[in-house]
Image: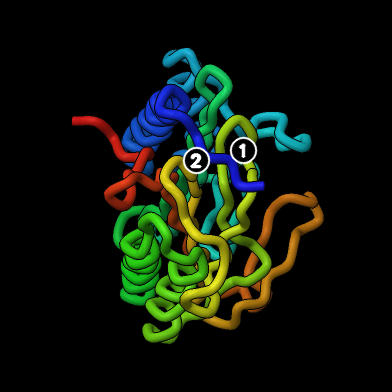
Amino acid sequence: MIICKSEVELDLMREAGRIVAETHRLLARAIRPNITTKELDQIAEEFIRSQGAIPSFKGYNGFPGSICASVNEELVHGIPGPRKLAEGDIISIDIGAQYKGYHGDSAWTYPVGEISETAKRLLAVTEQSLYRGIAEAKPDARLYTLSHAIQTCIEDAGFSVVIEYVGHGIGTDLHEEPQIPNYGVPDKGPRLKPGMVLAIEPMVVVGERFVQTLEDDWTVVTADRTLCAHFEHTIAITAAGYEILTLPRS
């Protein structure tokens, strides 16, 4: 069942989204060579809690971190730890915050210093695919029209779409219905309605789409160890179209 949120609930999700967005802004300033992913995790947790919120991921199914920090060939669910970032790395940071029972969720992939032209193009295309999908969000649109827009953007650029991991609804649970694949047939799937809140998150690989999970039972990497990227926003469907909830306030 897809849950539509009331305006009161949306206000709480806007606040959760603000906290997530401002946490991203803090980490974007902190990312540099030699900082550890654990240090980034500590910055994020301290800020989230200072805002009266709780890190959504910490303890979720046993996950030990407040953020997911995935470097280079790591796609998602990277555990923060002693690894130091190096010049030329890219790092995908996924952040969730629970505010008064409601979650916000956003991921972004950041360069560490100067990165390769391939990495720059990967980041640009993945971000573009996110906004291509969001642009299709409006009442009565079919969900997989968004999915198709994301897929087309990625594959037209010569990159691969991961199919094992998808976006999702979000609210009082971090993961709600519907599942939102980054591939699909347009004009198919559930119809969007005002009040639906969706976490849209394309995951893109330079090489082949196949992934595997490491021995820590969390970190997902590309099977061919090529670079990958992950971008995500939480959006609400409105009467006029959509509202991105995970943008920082000016």
Quadrant occupied by the C terminus: top left
Mark 1 to mark 2 CA distance (whole Å):
8 Å
Which comes sooner in the sequence, label 1 or label 2? 2
Please indicate whether residue 135 sits to the left or right of residue 167 in the image.
left
Residue 107 at what x, y percent from top left? Answer: 46, 48
Q: Position of residue 3 (x, y in %)?
A: 58, 41
**Outermost residue, left direction?**
250
Q: Which residue: 77% across, 35% down?
A: 62
Label 2 crowding class (10 Å Cα cut-off): few <14, some 14-19, many 20+?
Answer: many
Residue for point 41% across, 45% down: 194
Residue picked out by circle 1: 174
Q: Percent x, y for residue 20?
A: 42, 33
- Which percent across, then down, holds residue 211? 68, 70
Residue located 60% across and 60% down the image: 166
At label 1, counting other C-alpha atoms closer than 10 Å, the crowd grade (few under 14, some 14-19, many 20 or more) is some
- Whether tag 1 and tag 2 are in contact, CB under 8 A, the answer is yes
Does 16 sit above or below residue 50?
Answer: below
Disc marking residue 50: none
Residue sitting at x 39%, y 65%: 133
Q: Is residue 86 left or right of residue 212?
A: left
Q: Nearer the viewer, residue 4 or 33?
A: 4
- The disc labelled 2 sits on which kind of residue? Asp
Per the image, the residue denoted by label 2 is: 105
What kind of residue is marked 1? Leu
Residue 158's quadrant in the figure?
bottom left
**Residue 115 can be seen, yes or no:** no
Which one is nearer the viewer's eye here, 118 or 9?
9
Secondary structure state at the residue bearing disc 2 = strand
Q: Nearer the viewer, residue 39 or 3?
A: 3
